[in-house]
Amino acid sequence: MQTAFVWDDALASYRFTATHPMNPRRLQLTLELIRRLGLIEADQVVAPRRASDDELLLAHAPELVDAVRRASAGEVFPGAARFGLGTDDVPIVEGMHDAAAHIVGATLTAAELVMSGRAKRAFNISGGLHHARRAESAGFCVYNDLAVAIRWMQKQHGARVLYIDYDAHHGDGVQWIFYDDPDALTLSFHESGAFLFPGTGFVEETGAGDGVGYSVNMPLDAHTEDDSFEAVFRALVPDIVKAYEPDVIVLQCGCDAHVLDPLTHLRCTTGLFERMTRLVCDVADEHCEGRVVATGGGGYAIYKVVPRAWTLVWAALNGIDAPDVIPDDYLRMLRLECGELVPSTLRDAPDAFLPSDRRAAATETNTRTLGSVRRAVLPLLTGWGLGF
Amino acid sequence: MLVRSRMAQRVITVAPDTPIADALALARKHRIRHLPVVQGERLVGLVTDRDIRLAVPPMWADQHSELQDALRTRTVQEVMTRELITVHPDMPIEEAGKLLYAHRIGSLPVVTGDALVGILTESDVLQAFVDLFGVNQASSRIEVRMENRPGELARVVRVIGIEHRVNITGLVLAPTKEEYSIGIMHLQTVNPTPVIDALRRLGYTIGWPSLEIEAYGPIDPADGHSPSRGVVTSWPE
């Protein structure tokens, strides 16, 4: 199979409160759009397996798992805040352990499919919860499905894992869990921590101990648009893949860098996510037999952006050129549900959004940061004096 | 924040009769530029890489062996600074920073009585300053423009902390012209938009990502200096 789509309806039970931005409706809308466009075969959909407690403990402290289990009863308990639970970001809701663990199981399933060769690539749109730390839930993320899956691939398959994250927020949870580990390289592209949660992900965060050089951060100016984002992505990803020679790439596909996303300032469009995903698939084909385990992530414009962005990502993972026009009946359904006009093509038109007056400054800042990133990490990865 | 919590406590020192060559080697090994000179516990001077460079005439650089001999036979007490500006471990860090800046020096030996107990360098002060603005916990940074009068900050903090139950993990008030103050705040949430909307409804101007960028626009290199280098003098309405 070229690409598997890991899904069952229970994955949409990861939800907090009615007004919480992390709304699983976006997942259902995405799959619906993929189906209506005829971009998926029935046998590509694979149901997730359960994650065992031992698997959760690959990346998490037992105290956190205990605390989430307690919170899962739906009641606030003393000391919950120490684990990041019971906050506006991660409210305590009934059944949250099962819902969060189910997402971990889905990313593990994606990893299993890819590592066993049953699928070349796999996509879990419900995953990508990159802010959860070893002993603390944070930023809408209860458990870190990415970190668990990376550890599992290291342990079961002796894999060297390259983690690439183009979510608008820094992939801090994954970075800190593997900060001293040279067998997982984390590469995060995000709006600079000077402007956006979680406030980290600066160039100087290059790893610790044996892991020095294996944590790479490309912080972007708040007003970054498609061309500058894509330029720095192209300037780093192929060189890092070549230097690191991973066995598999884990790709976090948060689509909140979109200009319509309410939680970030970046000014990108849906076509960017398609092009970046394609590039990752191309380098994976060249260096690690095409293996890509892809997940969702951030994305809070749930009607106008997420379904379109992740449909394009899915098509890119399949090596298909998706048609641009969205069927009328789907658009009608969306308009009825959200009460607003929604874009009628998968890719935003080139003139859909006005360029920002900070465009030139943002591009210049990003180019300068890119130079710092290359100077800071490429010598460590390639060996001093080998052309860098 | 006191000097004691930011100073280096294990200080690399030399004795007055240490040959200059040994002091240089020690400084290079530990990658430091300031060596307090002590007799027993008592601080008697400070030798820096600059003292040594000034003490060694540049012409010697051409006569390599002579230079090496001089560095071996001459001792640090011949080149060290004896009149030192020192601080007590309980001095606030901002006071120590002012001293470093006013006297254009790179480090302050920390002394109780006559005894050397630590050293505070300009990078230690810079690091403390960075930490004040920076983040220890995952958070979102916003700027709030408030009128500079009693109760305004309390009102803002009330909206954030009590009404929206969002933890404030960092707060710095940036200097501005008198009517306004700008609070740079770190909020422990990935989604600051409910707080921002509530504050805007109360009439506050919010910077997210930044008020300053909106206020100044691009910097003109022909200007010679940019306003952001000095005290902020105006903010957008």
Image (cartoon, helix red, strand yellow):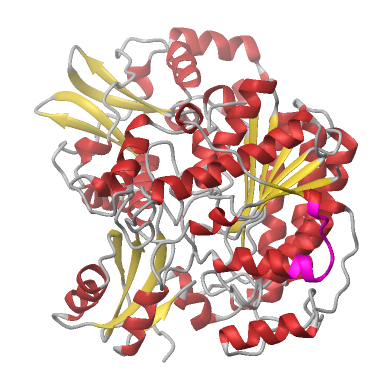
Left or right placement of residue B92 versus residue A280 in this view: left
Instruction: Name the foreground residue: A304 vs B50.
Output: A304
Q: In the image, what residue occupies the spot 65% across and 28% down?
A: A153
Quadrant in which the N terminus of chain A appears = top right
Instruction: Name the foreground residue: B223 vs B131.
Output: B131
Asked if the stretch drawn in magenta spans residue A35, the answer is yes
- Residue A295 at what x, y percent from top left? 65, 50
Q: Which residues are magenta?
A: A33-42
- Residue A386 at what x, y percent from top left? 83, 28
- Is residue A153 among what the camera can see? yes
Instruction: Name the foreground residue: A276 vs B31.
Output: A276
**As drawn, A195 above or below A357:** above
Asked if the stretch drawn in magenta spans residue A116, the answer is no
> Quadrant of residue B39 in the image?
top left
Quadrant in which the C terminus of chain A appears = top right
- Residue B209 at what x, y percent from top left? 49, 71
